[in-house]
Amino acid sequence: DTAVSQTPKYLVTQMGNDKSIKCEQNLGHDTMYWYKQDSKKFLKIMFSYNNKELIINETVPNRFSPKSPDKAHLNLHINSLELGDSAVYFCASSQGREGKAKNIQYFGAGTRLSVL
Amino acid sequence: ILNVEQSPQSLHVQEGDSTNFTCSFPSSNFYALHWYRWETAKSPEALFVMTLNGDEKKKGRISATLNTKEGYSYLYIKGSQPEDSATYLCAFRLTTDSWGKLQFGAGTQVVVTP
């Protein structure tokens, strides 16, 4: 069983479309994240939710909207896709909040988004 | 240093040789340093989390050290094997960062040739 699973693995779409990427974790974690791997290969945090509450919201265009229906799921919806949104997006999860320094994050396999 | 820097970007190692590489990070407001191993076509996997100056962690042939005063961590691979080929990422968190916010380096790609 995959611990953190993202769907789809590949997503090819036209500029201007709206798309969603889904993420589910079966680790019982209470915190989930979305990262974008940029052109220089850095993993950049976009959002984080803890128990369905938004706790990290980096400077991301408001065309990107995360949705957490429950603590096992964190989906990423992107409106009006642009060429620059092409990247690999990674979902991750971890357990715990303040006072627990470990915060080991478990990653999904990534979703490669190509905007044409 | 404002962000995390990893060097070298890549290295080639002969099977059986030992190697090491560096992660440099801001020494002010340090909270934690993570190392992840990322094999091609797989997900990054956590190797170590270190929080205290002088921390040393070991997992099999891989070990890491931490110097928070000068802002660097070394990862060592002893007796490299082809299965050690991967990109090794480090990530740090500052005390001023929100919970869970890790800032990742671009990684050191290690290729072990038989």
Image: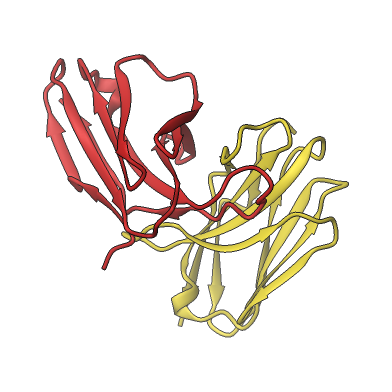
Chain colours: A red, B yellow
Q: Residue furthest right?
A: B69
Residue A86, horizontal then vertical, whole percent: 27, 30
Viewer-nearest residue: B75 or A55: A55
Q: Which residue is located at x 79 percent, y 36 percent? A: B29
The image shows residue B60 at horizontal and vertical percentages of: 60, 82
* Image quadrant occupied by the N terminus of chain B: top right
Q: Nearer the viewer, residue A108 or B77?
A: A108
Quadrant of the image containing the C terminus of chain B: bottom left
Left/right placement of residue B80 relative to residue B111 reads right
Q: Is residue B73 above or below residue A62?
A: below
Q: Is residue A80 above or below residue B103?
A: above
Is residue B22 left or right of A41 when viewed as pictured? right
Which residue does the image show at 55% across and 78% down from the upper left? Answer: B14
| Total numbered badges shown on the rendered structure | 0
Rendering quarter of residue A98: top right
Q: Quadrant of residue A83?
A: top left
* Nearer the observer, B73 or A20: A20
Residue A75: image location, x then y, percent? 27, 36
Percent of width and height locating residue B73: 74, 56
Depth check: give the residue in front, B105 or A46. A46
Indicate whether B5 appears above or below B12.
Answer: above
Height in image: B61 above or below A54? below
Give the residue at x 61% y 83%.
B79
Image-based side of B88 in relation to A67, left or right:
right
**Side of A98 where B10 appears, left or right:** left
